Amino acid sequence: MTFHSAISFWLIVPLVILLVWTLWRKKKKTPTLQFGSVEVLKTVTPSVRTRLMHLPLLLKALAIVFAIIALARPQEMNTKIKKNVEGIDIVICLDISDSMLIEDMKPLNRLEAAKETIKKFIEGRSSDRIGLVIFAGESFTVVPPTLDYQLILQRVGEITTAQQARIKDGTALGVALANAAGRLKDSQAKSRVVIFMTDGENNSGTIDPETGLDIAKGYGVKIYSIGIGKDGPTRIPIYTRDIFGQKVKTYQPFDSTVNEDLLGRMAKDTGGKYYRASKEDSLRGIFKDIDSLEKTKIDINKFTNYTEKFPPYLVIAIILYLAALVLGRSWLRRVP
């Protein structure tokens, strides 16, 4: 319960002062008789009427207290909060070509670094539909945009490379971009985003990157493109089985190249941003930046309804005051 005019309680201070002063005045005006001995008077028991002679005054004071409470306007507050959430539809498009196994990023390789960062990004979002698309020489939708974050996290954890999944290897950027953008074509969200992650350049697929970019622009999709890993000569791990069926890892030379011109144009032409991640910490920083740029809009409307509770206090004050008047002019009336 709240009080609309709590300042009214200050009126109790002069009321207490007036009550004390009135009782003191009445006591001072009480007539006295002188006796040689009061031993006999001590045996006289005061009557009920005598004991209650100050009751009318106290009832009036109590009536004024209740009147002050009513004047303070006690109210019952009922607050309703309406939250309007304007979510974002996001599709994460991840390259799983065998070059993502290159071990130049912690905790193990490019792919595992990307998976860990994606997981943390998903865990930090709310009210946004998130989908997952993977690609190598061909592209697949792992999870369409959904609010089931547990499902997405589970699927991210299950991602393997093209070699392990036994799908066509290569880097089909155009096919992947067209697939990711297509997942957002029916989106009703005002902000539609593709986070496009790759460590190579287009060398496969039936759709060229320019066509994929045109599709994304046509659907109003914003692209945040990320080039993963360092350019230049490196080694790519190759896994085989020996005659005993044991897994054997060997390395073969590989020339890692990211098409920064294409990735930069993809971002620029759609109003997004291009990033280069050569280390796992820079990849985490990139996702933090994207997280800050693409914030979910939440409007909170607060409605408060007040119910007045002063009438009962006012009624009690009137009853007490009337009782004081009746008692003061009848049974407890003082006769000089």
Image (tube, grey):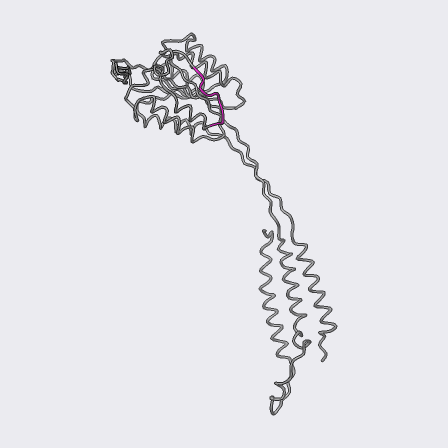
In the image as oriented, which residue stretches furthest toward the bottom?
36
In the image as oriented, which residue stretches furthest toward the right?
330
In the image as oriented, which residue stretches furthest toward the front?
244
Regarding residue 271, the answer to whether it shows in the image is no
Regarding residue 257, the answer to whether it shows in the image is yes
On the rendered structure, is 307 left or right of 219?
Answer: right
Residue drawn at (53%, 34%), measured in percent from left and top? 299
In the image as oriented, which residue stretches furthest toward the top?
206
Q: Quadrant of residue 242?
A: top left
Looking at the picture, does residue 18 appear above or below residue 310?
below
Q: Nearer the viewer, residue 265 or 315?
A: 315
Residue 122 lies within the magenta run: no
Assign the magenta stretch its main secondary structure.
strand
State the quadrant of the C terminus. bottom right
- Residue 8: give x, y in percent of width and height: 60, 57
- Residue 221: give x, y in percent of width and height: 47, 19
Looking at the picture, does residue 69 appear above or below residue 77?
below
Magenta part of the protein: which range? 140-148
- Residue 100: give x, y in percent of width and height: 33, 18
- Residue 166: give x, y in percent of width and height: 37, 13
Q: Nearer the viewer, residue 9 or 156?
A: 156
Residue drawn at (61%, 65%), measured in percent from left and top? 15
- Count how many numbered circles sit on residues in the image: 0
Looking at the picture, does residue 316 appear above or below residue 263?
below
Looking at the picture, does residue 196 appear above or below residue 296?
above
Q: Quadrant of residue 245?
A: top left
